[in-house]
Each structure stands twice: as structure tokens, then as C-alpha cells.
Amino acid sequence: EILFNQHSPNIVFHAAAYKHLPIVEDNIIEAVINNVHGTKNVINASIKYNIRKFLLISTDKAVRATSAMGLTKRLSEILVQAYSSKFKNKTTILSMVRFGNVLNSSGSIIPLFRNQINQGGPITITHPDVTRYFMTIPEAVSLVLYSMYISKGGEVFVLKMGKPIKILDIAKKMISF
């Protein structure tokens, strides 16, 4: 709350979360504390300080979640929707945006593969048939900003991600370069 009090922001982009699957799976309690309780704290501070708009940055892994990370993000989304309903006619508009993997971001497979290739391999792939949706960093930024702009409260914005790409195909392309 100190930042809210000192800087009086108008909008909040809430992106703070443990989002790397292995880290979350090995530290489920910490993930719940950070991802779910952290979201609740930021929502409460946003409402208390009359933030105009709050946007949760979520993930496609929250859809029919099968991992602790996806579940914690889904719980965070449910919190946003619950608070949005409860405070519908108040100052703060709460919504969320959900998307897939951002190419070349810190959590992306690209830096991991690059690192593994630079070390002489091997490249680790969980399964040859695994596919993921990807977007570029500019696409992700545009989606976040546009979602914030059009939000009215309680929405879940989702980017049309096109066709999923095989992780194996990405690895092969990176090796061939």
C-alpha cells in the first residue's frame, strides 16, 4: 500500500506471480500465498486507493487448469471477477487478460533452448507432440494496453492466438540456425 499512497497511480497492471511451472509445482504453498493472496492484496489496495482500472495479467493455463500454477492463476481470476461484481458501481474497474506464451520473454522456451544449444545440448523436450500458442512481445503489450482501454469490469480478454506450434519444431528451427 505504500506505493499506492506515495504515487497515487490511476491504473494497475498486476503481473506479479510465480509463473514457471517447475518452481510452482515444487512450492505450491508459496505459489498460493504469492499468486492468490498477493492478487487479493493488490485488489484491496486498488479499491482502497480508488484506482481507476485494475488489470490482472493471467495465463491460458488457467483454462481447465491441470497444474498448481494454472489453478493459482484461475483462483486469482475468480477473485477479480468476485470483487468486480461486489464493487460494480464503485470507482475501480477490475478485469483481466489471458494469453499464452510470449516469445523470447524470460519465461519462454526460446531462452531455455538458446541456453541449452549454447552449452552444446541436449535440448529438453517433454514430449514430441506438445504444442503451445505463442505471441510476440509487441503483441502481448498491445493486448494488455487495449484490454485496459476497453475494460468495463469483470471481463476476461483473450487474444486470438492462431494455431498452436509444436515445441519440437521450434527446437529444430533453432538448432538449424
Image (spheres, rainbow, N blue to C red):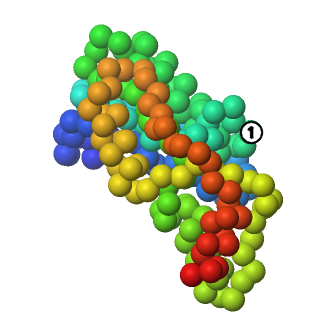
Residue occupying image coordinates x 29% and y 27%: 150
| Lateral position of residue 118 relative to residue 86, left or right | right
Q: Quadrant of residue 2?
A: top left
The amino acid type of the residue labelled 1 equals Thr
Residue sticking out furthest to the right: 127
Q: Position of residue 157 (x, y in %)?
A: 44, 31
Q: Residue at x 36, y 20 (%)?
A: 153
Residue of label 1: 66
Residue 36 seen in the current view: yes
Q: Quadrant location of residue 54?
A: top left
Residue at image point 24% right, 28% down: 52
**Which residue is nearer to you in this view: 174 or 55?**
174
Left or right of 90 on screen, residue 72: right
Residue 41, can we see it?
A: no
Residue at the (57%, 81%) spot, across then down: 177
* Image quadrant occupied by the N terminus: top left
User: Of helix, strand and loop, which one carries label 1?
Assistant: loop
